[in-house]
Amino acid sequence: MRETDLLQQLAASSAEGADGLDTIGFKQLFRQHPAGVAVITFAGPEGPMGFTATSVISVSAAPPMLAFAIAASSSTWQTLQQAQTVLVNFLDAPSAHLSARFARRGTDRFAGVEHRRLPTGEPLLTEAAAWVRSRVAQHVPTGESHLVTLHALEAQIARTSAPLVYHDRTYHGLGQHSRL
């Protein structure tokens, strides 16, 4: 979609009602906003569980807090509500296939995926570029989703490489070619 078409459509959807921007306009807006990609993993009663998240944000450095959003309709939401801790696995460009795998519904997301359990029980994706183990601080219902805030407990950077970003429904790797 051309930029002028997008701007016209957003302006039209904003003017449609006093309740705010409509869902279609909102989604179109955020398709133009790149986001880092992570896989949230945790120990469930039936085994390891996880899902792709492009909503991970840093909230506070002191204390170290982060957050992510999950749709209330997500197949993992019911189990995630019971988790005390989670692992945020940050992905890089070479691990884009993990993002696609953990975004799929109705499959064993861990089948054939190299992972190991930390001594505290959370599943770690061995291909993750970095990870942070966190204690769940709060679940906040927000529209059709829940905002989950986390207190960071420990982290590790396995390697620095081209970060994976999601933009306009497509994966991209950032590297020297993308520097301004």
Image: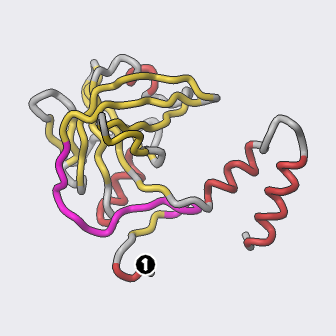
Q: Which residues are magenta?
A: 155-170
Q: Residue at x 43, y 78 (%)?
A: 178
Give the residue at x 35% y 31%. Answer: 150
- Residue at 31% across / 61% down in the picture? 92
Please tell me which residue lies in front, 22 or 64: 64
- Quadrant in which the N terminus appears: bottom right
Amino acid at circle 1: Ser
Q: Which residue is mark 1?
A: 178
Q: In x, y percent, where is residue 96?
A: 36, 60
Residue 36 x %, y % = 42, 55
Label 1 Cα crowd, 10 Å radius (few <14 / some 14-19 / many 20+): few
Does the magenta segment cover residue 10? Answer: no
Point 22% across, 46% down: residue:
125
SS for callout 1: helix
Give the answer, above or below, for where 36 lies relative to 147: below
Question: In the figure, residue 104 lies in which quadrant?
Answer: top left
Image position of 126 with respect to 138: above or below: below
- Tell me where residue 39 appears, x and y as whole percent: 35, 44
Residue 168 counted in the magenta span: yes
Q: Quadrant of the C terminus?
A: bottom left
In which image quadrant can residue 42 be found?
top left
